[in-house]
Amino acid sequence: MSTTLAEPSKPPTGQDDPAAPPTKRRDPHSWLKIALPLAVVALFLFAWDTAVRISASEVFPRPLDVARGIRELMQKGLLARYIVASLFRVTWGFGLAVVVGVPFGLFLGWFGRAYQAFNPMIQIFRPISPIAWIPVAILWFGITDLAPIFLIFLASVFPITVSATAAVQNMQPVYLRAAQNFGLSRVQLFRRVIFPACLPQIITGIRIALGVAWLVVVAAEMIAVNSGLGYLIIDARNAGKRYDLVVAGMVMIGLIGLLLDLLVRRLETFDEVRWGYANQ
Amino acid sequence: MSLRNTLLLCFSGWLIVITALHARMNPESMRGMEELLRSFRRQKDTVSTEKFKIGFLPVTCHLTCPVTDFINQQVTGQSTFQPVRFNSWPELKESYLAGHTPATFILAPMAIALREQGVRIKIVYLGHRDGSAVMVHKDSQIFRMEDLRGKRVAIPNRYSNQRLLFFRALKQAHMTIDEIELLEMPPPDMPAALYSKSVDAICSGEPFMGQTELDGYGRVLWLTKDVWPNFISCVLAVRDDVIQTRRSDVQALVDGIAKSGKWLDNSMEHRMSAAQFVSKNYYMQDPRLLSFVLSKPPDRVKYTRLTPLKPDFEEIEQLGKESGILQGTAHFEDYVDPSFADVATEHAEAWNFEGPKP
């Protein structure tokens, strides 16, 4: 009993091998984890710069032009404003998608008849690009923040629902049989067995959906909002030859996307999720 | 801490922080939400007393909209209407159709087509005269209309007057529409398309045409004033019900636009001043671009003689029918309400405003 209680307080070693040494050894090549991606980035920037120089393009910006563009946006105080606006819309759109998508997906996964009834409709809605929904969003929500939030919600709710449904459907029957042997009530069964068993797969779905939500920010901000990184790209296209700002918007979307992915990956270090990967 | 608690704590904390930051840094977004909520609560039949919103795009065809707003704010401390900037025609039109912008600057043939489709729309004033161009690459061998035979030409929209302009120009050159390939493309993308030579010619409103000239790779094939003098591309349109319920507001708007038009055409100093404050506050463009298209040559675009006239619109109707975008079921009296323009033309004088020096 004492060992099971002591286990969660152990710092995670990131290794599942019980024979692993108890003290964490420093990886002598850990610097490579940072140096390798940086080298690829540097190579990419060099290739981009060389390509623009060789083609002598007057329209396409060089990396340094983009860096200057980002600095200009920072000096005008626009960069922080736009990042906050985009994150606000994605937070609400994606948050609502999680609140709706996870319970609905679990419901569909558990009740076969409900799945039969709703699945075709979900599969019809799922492949429709958020851009196609723009007229509907304007009609319902006008030219307010609710329109892009609605588009981001639509883009992310389906991957979350589908992954939660699949998680219940793919659950190993042995968990349920064991729970029944213990005589768990329905609520207990859901809270203590079904939800924890499905969590790793749901988290994977959420991670994909967050990527999608951030991906559609450009399309969602095509509506007459006057802030956001997507708006920055569309606005810069209207502003004559400011393709440095177009690429600056792309770079910022990419960098924040990377940060968001790193954050969601942190979830995978929790014991409640890690066991799912260990089973695979 | 367990996963559930960590998630709940982090997400709700983040939600509060990002919402508070957004409300602080982008207050106009929050005001939009408040207005939307108020409009849900309001009875549909009650007359709104709020400032009404006008849709516009960052093009010279709609320049009088931001100019009127800016001068109104400088002269009286407030504007009588709220300009709402869109980035493309479809969103601008959809917002008008949904009633979020009861007045809008819109392509003339598009307004007529909407009337034919039963939309309650009335043209009350013109946005400008002239102000479009056809550009080719400076290295190209295209020097006359006839040289465009078999070439690919980008136009903004099938309902744009630029398309009708081509129909007119082709007729003058004894050519048919089958002899060139027309391609629809958003005007902001046209300069890059011409630069990369993926199209042979581009045609839209300014400042996108002037941009190619300013950047040194575009050459003017012809300006609209050379082919279709007093060309109309965009008009100011208002919903029928707004005309009935808010006549004085619509009149004030048309008066303001008329005053701005006269102010812009009064002197080159005014145009240069407008290029500065509109670029910085409304269009977010390099002021050099607007300065260029408003001055080279000065009659590239004009903002006077903006009363809608029957013969002009009959010609648009005729070309619209020939080009297949109009049915011919709506006529001048159906889609134009000239009463506001008549009053404005009689009374409106140019603004007494000098504007910030460039």
Image (cartoon, coloured by chain):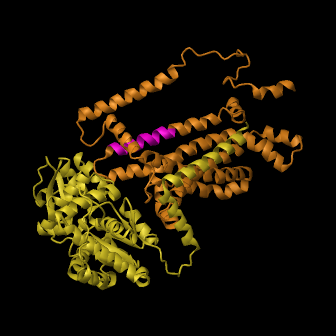
Question: Quick check: A124 left or right of B266?
Answer: right
Q: Tell me, what hue is chain A?
A: orange
- Say which chain is yellow: B
User: How many marks can you see?
Assistant: 0
In this rendering, does residue A212 appear at all?
yes
Q: x%, y% of residue B150?
A: 18, 56
Q: Is residue A248 above or below residue B203?
A: above
**Residue at x-position 49% and y-position 57%:** B27
Pick the front one: A179 or B89: B89
Residue A191 appears at what percent x and percent y?
Answer: 79, 45
Q: Is residue B48 above or below residue A219?
A: below
Tell me residue B163's x, y (percent).
Answer: 24, 65
Dominant SS type (magenta): helix
Please report the bounds of the magenta region as a residue range: A244-257
Q: Position of residue B20 (x, y in %)?
A: 57, 52
Query: What residue is rendered at 29% in x and 76% in y?
Result: B125
- The residue at the point 66 percent across, 32 percent down is A269
On whether residue A253 falls in the magenta region, the answer is yes
Q: Quadrant of residue A192?
A: top right
Which of the image's four quarters has the C terminus of chain B?
A: bottom left
Work out whether residue B305 or residue A212 is closer to the camera in this orientation and state it: B305
State which quarter of the image contains the N terminus of chain B.
top right
